[in-house]
Image (cartoon, rainbow, N blue to C red):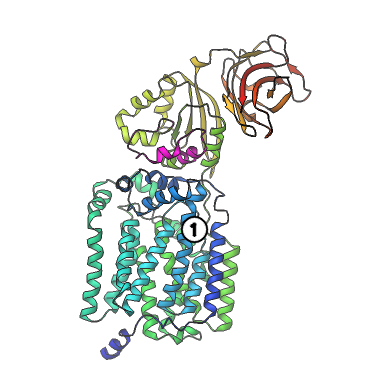
Amino acid sequence: MPSPRRAIRIQSLPMTLDTRSHPRWTFYAMLAILLLAAYLRIHDLNAQGLWGDEGWSIWLARGDTVRDLTMTMVADHHGPVYSILLRAWELVAGGSVLALRMITVLFSIASVALLYRLGRALFSPAAGVWAALAFTLMDKHVVLTQEVRDYPMIFLVMIGIAYFYVRWRQQPRGGNAFGFVLFSVLGLYLHYYCYMVNLAIGVHALLTLRGRDTWRHFAALNALTALAFLPWIMIVIHQFVLTPVDTEVLTIHGMPLNRETVEYLGKESLGTPLALNLLLLGVGALGPLIRTPGPMSRVPRARRLSGALLAVLWFGLPLILTAALHSRYPLLTDRNISVIMPAIALLVGHGLTAFDRFGRVFLVGLVLVNGLFTTSSFFVKPPWRQMAADIAARYPAGEPVLLDVEGAHAALWYQLALELPGYDRKATLNRLPAETPDDTIVSLYWYRKTYRELFLPTLQARLDGVPGLWMAYWGDEAKKRDVIDLLAQEGFVRTGTLTYYHHGSPIYAHRYDRAAALDDTAARFGDAITLRRIALPETIRPGADLPALLWWSAAETPPLDYTVSVFLLDSGGVLRAQHDGPPADGTAPMTTWAPGQIVFDAHTLALPADLPPGEYAVGVKLYTWWDGAILPTAEGEDYAVVGTVRVR
């Protein structure tokens, strides 16, 4: 055991290298790494639609004042910073999914750059470069970046807290102390897991800080942080102490602590092959204890020990605390555990500097090739974007869309807000969720939570006078039988279904229509087939898609599967646009129709871009596709003119 004098002398050394002396190659290396980081994060950024948590981010970032945005977070378990920032970004950059995800890309790239600075301050410029490379290549980091979520900002803030702590140890006065307090406060108001790095810093300080004045200064900085967070403390108490967490919440939002979870989280956080990253992580953590052949040994021993200790604490404390609290709160998730990834990258980067030039080049090449050509984390999101587009293409104006998809309602809500024609998305975002309910996109999840025992009467009042609706349906059918029974009680019948799958689980978009609203006859074909109703827009632009919505029934099951042709004729009877296809896109062939069953059938006509303005007739005919034989109308015509539309 070293003598006390030796221990004091080691701890008195600053944690950082002289940052004025770092190789020129690091500048070009970091430029290449940042370009690579930008490419990996922007590539396929908009390939998938939103998923549940992304929808919640947008759902909570609502209101037209900072106070409104702050109050929405009371019902959540995070601080208000990201909601305020996301709302401001939406006002500047727009509300598309691509635009909303771009802000996370910016934070992600900035976190890579700042991690280099932290690695350089803790260990050496080379360690900073390799840490930035490891962080860039982490598949989980890329996945989290391509979402409307706050995790890349969390990474940046946590790295900033650690960086200013390290800089403060070298230069206690000036901007470093302010930066440490600022980032610490920002982290607490952003996401409570940001404080995990502060806990690691606290333990690190207990083990390494020396001097009464230094400790007083450090205590003062943490006291300022606590004081700045004091106004939010009552909210935290409400969120975690007064809000009950039952077994269902733990099961849905958290993961069980078992072998499968550990293996999954290990793969998500460390990547594959696990052995490579574990080796480098272990060398980065334990290498300072021995003399190594690489540049690691040229860093003063006290400095590399202190830096490795901070990274190890950052890596270990979140795991220990999450495991300890997982039975009380749903904290054990891959996203919460992702806060250790900057620490992993630091240890991997430091570990690479333990090897000689040949070994280092080989391992860096292996890390690069493995990171670019293997995938350890990939998230297939539910098909809410496709469902929203399909409903929008089959949507009679003014009717409600009911969302009965459990906690995923917010993602589908926003995708529909982007797709439904005439929907005022901005007005909805300016309203708090608890204010006047959305009359068009109705979240039954939110209705259930808000109205409780008045849920069904409130929904019944909303459906009063409605001729038809769409209902997205996913989850436990037993929970949602009440809505299905209410629709039947109100005279609605199911007239169509769109089916999707997510990891083998079916998701439905059901079309419901009030049977009494379909008693009319728009046209008759043959002896038994009736077109009961057709819905068309009054006006449309040249080059747009013209939706034609049809409701069919048959007095008896048709003997043949007829194809439906919907077409546009000008005043001279010239064909201008046409769409042919089986009813309901082939999901409801006529030979399967039960007598009296109502079938919803949508067709989309692509109008020519040079279509002259004017009034056009819409015609419908039925024929057999294999021989083109037409089923005449009851009047003996080849087709029926069922409506008009004005092009302007």
User: Viewer-proximal residue, 103 or 55?
Assistant: 103
Percent of width and height locating residue 624:
74, 22
Q: Is residue 300 visible?
A: yes
Compared to residue 499, the image places residue 523 above or below, namely: above
Residue under the point 44% across and 59% down:
152
Query: In the rendered view, does 300 fall on the left or right side of 27?
Result: left
Q: Is residue 569 magenta?
A: no
Residue 565 makes an appearance in the image: no
Percent position of residue 585, x then y:
63, 30
Q: Which residues are magenta?
A: 412-440
Residue 216, by quadrant, is: bottom left
Residue at far top of view: 635
Which quadrant holds residue 159?
Answer: bottom left
Q: Where is residue 304 drawn, in percent x and y? A: 40, 81
Q: Amino acid at mark 1?
A: Val
Asked if 357 appears above or below 628 in the picture, the reply is below
Looking at the figure, which quarter contains the N terminus? bottom left
Within the magenta stretch, is there residue 431?
Answer: yes
Q: Nearer the viewer, residue 269 or 466?
A: 466
Compared across the picture, whether 615 is left or right of 34 comes to right
How crowded pointer 1 is (Cα within 10 Å; few <14, some 14-19, many 20+) is rated as many
Q: Along the horizontal axis of the image, is 486 left or right of 272? A: left
Q: Secondary structure at mark 1?
A: helix
Task: Using the image as rendered, state which of residue 554 and residue 141 is in the foreground.
Answer: 141
Position in image of residue 205 (x %, y %): 28, 75
**Relative to 472, is 566 above or below?**
above
Q: Which residue is mark 1?
A: 105
- What residue is at 58 percent from the left and 62 percent from the top? 374
